[in-house]
Structure formats: C-alpha cells, structure tokens
Image (spheres, coloured by chain):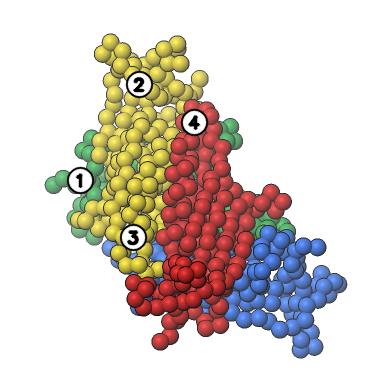
Chain colours: A blue, B green, C yellow, D red
C-alpha cells in the first residue's frame, strides 16, 4: 500500500505513549523524500498563510468582538489537517470616538498565533507575531521535535 | 455648512420619536444629489460585499464553530458606519468523517444575512441569501422607508 | 410579470439614445419601493465592499505587478452585475531593499477606484479613495443621475 | 552572529555552482533545530495558504481575465520571501449567458499552482491542485532536495 500511516491520537498505557495509526490518504501525492518533520513544517506554514490572508481586513469596533475573533481563528486553524492545538491572541486598539468612521480593521500585526501540528511522530510548534526589530509579522517555527513511543493498530485504537 | 446631519440614536419622549443629530464628516464628499435613501442603500451594499469577500473561505469542521462565525460576522457588519442591526445565520453541512481532509469551507451560499442601515431618516433592510431559482447568492433590499419624527440637537442629545 | 426591465446596452440612432431592455431576473426579490437610483447605489456599494475585502492583503514586491493588479481589480468589478465602467489606480510604495522581507501588502489606502453602475435609467458613479482629512478610505457616490432616451425591445436589440 | 546565512542567488563559474550568501535577518527567531529543508517546506506552505485564502472569491466573467489572474497570483507568490519560481494555471468555466448574474468566482479547485522555494541549499517544489480521488484541492510537496556547490561571500557576490 502506498500511503504513509499517520498517528492521529495518543494515550499512555503502562507509562508508554501509544499512538494509533490513521492512514493519510494524501500521503502518496507527496514525494517519498519528504520526512514527517518536513511535512509537519509544511502544514504549519499553510495554516499561518491561511490565518493572515483569510482574517485580516475584518472591521473591528467593539471590545467584546476581540475574544470572538480569537476563538473563530483558532477553530479555523483546528479545522485543517493535522492540527493539535491553536491559541490566538488579538491585540488591537479600538478608537474610543463614537464617530461612524471610528473603527479599525484587523491587521496581521494585531495577531499572535501559536499552533501545533503533529504528523506521524513529528511535532512542529509554529508562531506568527509582529517582530518590531524586523517591522514584520513573522511566521516562524518555535520548536520541532519527534515523539518517542510505540505505534499500534487494531482493536485498541478503535 | 456642507455636511449633512445624521440622526445617530433615537428615543421616545411623550410618544414622539426624537432623533439626535450627529454630523457625518464624510457627507461633503458625496454628490449633493444623493438622497438619504440612496446613501443608506449604498452603505447596505458595502456591508454585503464585505461579508461575502471577507468571510467566505474560512475552514469549518466543528459544529460549535458555526454559532461563533455568525456572531463574528454580525459584529463585523455592526462595526462599519450606520448599521443598526444585523442577524447572520450560517447553514453548512459538516462532513462526519474523522479523516484529516473531512472539513468544508464557508461559501456565500451558506450565508443568510439580514442587516438594517439607518442614515438620517432613511431605513434600509437588506439581505443576502441563496436563491435556488437563480442559483445565485443574491444581495437585495427587502425594505426601504423613511422614519417620521422630530430631529433634535443640543442638551438632550449629549 | 413581476420583473423590472433593465436597459443593458445603449446606442445612438438619429441622435436619440436608444436603450435595449434586458430583464433582471432578480428584480422581483427587491422591495417594489426601491427606485432604479437606489438599486444602482446598492450595486455600487457591493462592488466597493468587494474590492476592499477581496484584494487587500496581496503581497507586492515588483513595480510591474502594480499595473496587473489594477487590471485584475477592474475586471473583477466588471464581472459583477450592472457595471458599465471601472478604473483602478494603485499607489503603493515598494521597498527598494533586496531583503527577503522587503515587500509590502496592498491596503485599502493604496486604492483609487472609480466605477459606474447603470440600472435601468439610473447611473451611479462611485469612488473609493483615501481621504487624509478623515484618515479613512472612503467609499462614496460622486454622481447620480438618470439617462433620458427611448427604451426599445425587439429586433433592433438582438 | 546568530543569523543563518542564506544563499540568495547562484551562478556557474568553471562548471561549479557558486552561491552567494545573503543573511536572513529572521533566522534567529527560528528554533536552531530547524533544518534548511524544513524551513523551505514551511515557506512553501505559507505561500500556498496565501494563494487559497487571498485569491479565491474573485468574480470572473471575461475569458481575457484568466491570464491576468494567473500572472497576478504568480507575482504575489514571488513577492514573499525565498521564492524562486512560480507558475499558476487557472481552469475555470465561464458561463456563456449574457445575464447580469452569469459569472463565476475563483475557487481553489480552479487553481493549479507550482512554486519553488530555495532556502540555503534546500530546494522545495510544492504544488496545489485539485485531486478528484480525494475531492480536495491538495497542497503537497512534489520534490525536496539539496543543491551541491560552493558558497561564497565577498566581492564576487556584490
């Protein structure tokens, strides 16, 4: 069979992390030279590209709107493949005037996004936030690692 | 003075609707031939164009995500000038599979948006929803009218 | 029949502007109180909302990219219903550094958009551009008017 | 110095590929565990996430619009860091009717995007296109490799 297996969920059993295999039906379209870490890095990049280009531009006037925006972006991240965690913080200055034109729009520099991708044994923690030194909202990889543990299939995973 | 006044908030006093004037600092950029009704129709159009082109494309996998999306779109509408009300309903089929690729994305045909614009005495109720007969997600004006009542300035409005 | 006719194309014949009728299959969804001018203002608003929320955010690094962006936005405007003309100018400062991070993104304040909507006899000329006095990229109606002329159907229009 | 060097441009000299170093001012924000290949995969992901979430939704009515869209997407890709090549093909069915509502909008399944990222010695060729078997527009890595050659600094690179 050509598709690479993906360990979708893990749990502890007698102190050993046990991972259940789930097939990745798209794996066969990737070059076989791609490692699990490279794949996880690629998926993290897609997620951050999505966040910037989907959500910037939203009109913002109400303080209570900000928390909702954070949740909506987190859910969008988690909707795409192989995401394990996401945390979004929006820091935005809302004009205090009551003028009809006193609102702002979400910009990439208002975003602080952290997300974790797991693909097989690879784990990538990626982040998006504004770096004053670069005057640039940078998408970068904070950590990349590999889980150790056993991979199981069968009854225990169903 | 060139700018048209805008009645931003209303309340009842002895059975008469009283509207407070608020200046529209952008009014002078509009042709003086534009009526309040036309202006309200224009602002309603901007809002619906915003909704379609800002929010479609969001990845959706979780049922609890849908209510959040509705609120976030409503707040975005209310953030722009002269909006009085907005109600958004998202009807979207979420795949039940646990596959990594089993999610969907928000499309305009998933949206049912109703919003009210008030500009001066003009009130426009506009809507966006999918019309099977046209196979098209139509933005249209459900109602357009003019409020009657007194317009006040001064102490009572501050 | 409930649908309002729309004069889609015009030409001059013996010095008289002659307009050919084309049905608007969506007219019946609009309140009958909506005038042709109000409808044209609404369609102009949709177009400008689309432009802002569809195109801002595009990464820009190359001077030759700017003219292409202008054309692409014009075509997008003309693709939607009842547009007669569009002209887009993008004024954007591109960093001169060769650094990988030395690029910019299209923002609404970089846009100067003019478009004409015709609906029936109504003509709306709308514009989007940055107004320093308001520190706001304003969508507004520069002109609204009604064409005079005869409306024809039949052979001559086919 | 903490930042990793990046070979920005290459040329052949006496049959040997010579690469000039360019500093990556953002390298220090990445985990030192990230390889050049992983970084290149990450940047490729960002680009494809950008394409999908920036460009889908554009209204399309005119056949001549399609080539312009392809160029505009290619330029957007090349504007972001470390892109070496991009090729975009848009396959979209445009309704032939002259109805005001007879247009379509760009969807991810209309896109076939190929792009090459180079980061240091790593080269990633990534692709986005619709896979009927998955009924999904898949972003994937077609090839990943490392260039061999010498890396130079100094006079020859200026």
Local secondary structure at mark 1: helix
Q: Dot 3 falls on which chain?
A: A
- Marking on residue B28: 1
Depicted D8 relative to depicted A61: above or below:
below
Q: Residues within 10 Å of mark 2 (few under 14, many from 20)?
A: some
**Residue, x 46% and y 53% (percent of image)?**
D74
Q: CA distance from mark 3 to mark 1?
A: 20 Å
Eye-nearest disc, 4 or 2: 2
Report which residue position mark 3 lands on: A103
Eye-nearest disc, 2 or 3: 2
Report which residue position mark 4 lands on: C26
Local secondary structure at mark 3: loop
Residue A141, image x and y in percent? 52, 76
**Residue, x 42% and y 16% (percent of image)?**
C157
Local secondary structure at mark 4: loop
C88 or B48, which lies in front?
Answer: C88
């Amino acid at each position: 069979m050509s598709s690479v297996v993906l360990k979708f969920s893990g749990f502890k059993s007698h102190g050993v992390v046990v991972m259940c295999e789930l097939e990745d039906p798209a794996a066969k379209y990737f070059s076989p030279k791609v490692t699990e870490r490279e794949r996880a890095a690629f998926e993290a990049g897609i997620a951050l590209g999505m966040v910037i280009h989907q959500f910037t531009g939203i009109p913002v006037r109400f303080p209570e709107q900000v928390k909702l925006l954070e949740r909506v972006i987190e859910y969008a991240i988690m909707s795409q493949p192989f995401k394990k965690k996401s945390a979004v913080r929006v820091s935005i200055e809302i004009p205090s005037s009551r003028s009809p034109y006193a609102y702002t729009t979400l910009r990439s520099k208002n975003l602080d996004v952290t997300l974790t991708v797991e693909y097989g044994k690879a784990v990538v923690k990626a982040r998006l936030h504004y770096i004053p030194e670069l005057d640039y909202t940078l998408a970068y990889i904070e950590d990349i690692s590999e889980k150790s543990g056993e991979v199981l299939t069968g009854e225990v995973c169903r």
